[in-house]
Image (cartoon, helix red, strand yellow):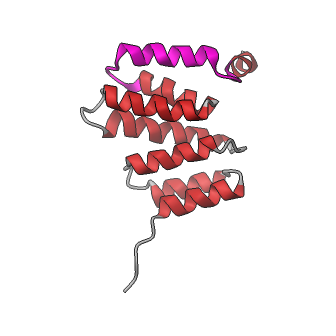
Amino acid sequence: MGFAVEKSRTIISAMILGRKVTAQDVAWLRREVFADGEVTRESAEELFAVVRAGMSNAPEWTELFVELITDYVVWQSRPTGVVTDEEAEWLIGRADECKSLDALAALVNVLAEAHRAPQWFVTAVRARALQWPGVEAALRARA
């Protein structure tokens, strides 16, 4: 008789200990952990743990992170397509712990895909885009 191993926690812990997320890690996460498309609150918390660790990650990481957080907040939470006050508070709280471009990208993408979100959340995301370190430099680099 075997026992179940929480794949996402094990894999994400290993990535944090390794101090970076590679393109291969992202492919593994897509194939082994999130293949069914389900993102739980626990796995979303783990994804934010990677962002909080402030590591040098492959560009594929940001795409996966933003996609999964958006799926969790906008499409898998009920009512679908609506960011509730509870979800908005959770998301802002996690993003504020990171204050990173990845976290900001997730916030902005959630707003872009949601059919409805609290006005205070829209205002809060806008404020973070103007205040967080690195945002201005990143925007200049893209221009």
Task: Name the residue rendered at 57%, 19% in the picture.
Answer: 128
**Is 82 on the left-hand or right-hand side of 106?**
left
Task: Name the residue rendered at 36%, 24% in the picture.
Answer: 114
Task: Name the residue rendered at 47%, 46% in the picture.
Answer: 45
- The percent position of residue 92, horizontal first and vertical second, equals 47, 28
Q: Quadrant of residue 60?
A: top right
Q: Quadrant of residue 2?
A: bottom left
Specify whether residue 130 is painted magenta: yes
Q: Is residue 4 above or below residue 92?
A: below
- The reply to whether residue 39 is in sight is no
Task: Name the residue rendered at 63%, 16% in the picture.
Answer: 131
Q: Which residues are magenta?
A: 113-135
Camera-nearest residue between 89 and 16: 89
Q: Is residue 116 above or below residue 101?
A: above
* Quadrant of the rendering where the N terminus is positioned: bottom left
**Is 107 on the left-hand or right-hand side of 140?**
left
- The percent position of residue 142, horizontal first and vertical second, equals 71, 20
- The percent position of residue 6, horizontal first and vertical second, equals 45, 65
Camera-nearest residue between 143 and 54: 54
Camera-nearest residue between 25 and 46: 46
**Is 13 on the left-hand or right-hand side of 119?**
right
- The reply to whether residue 44 is in sight is yes
**Tag count:** 0
- The percent position of residue 73, horizontal first and vertical second, equals 38, 35
Q: Looking at the magenta stretch, what is its main secondary structure?
A: helix
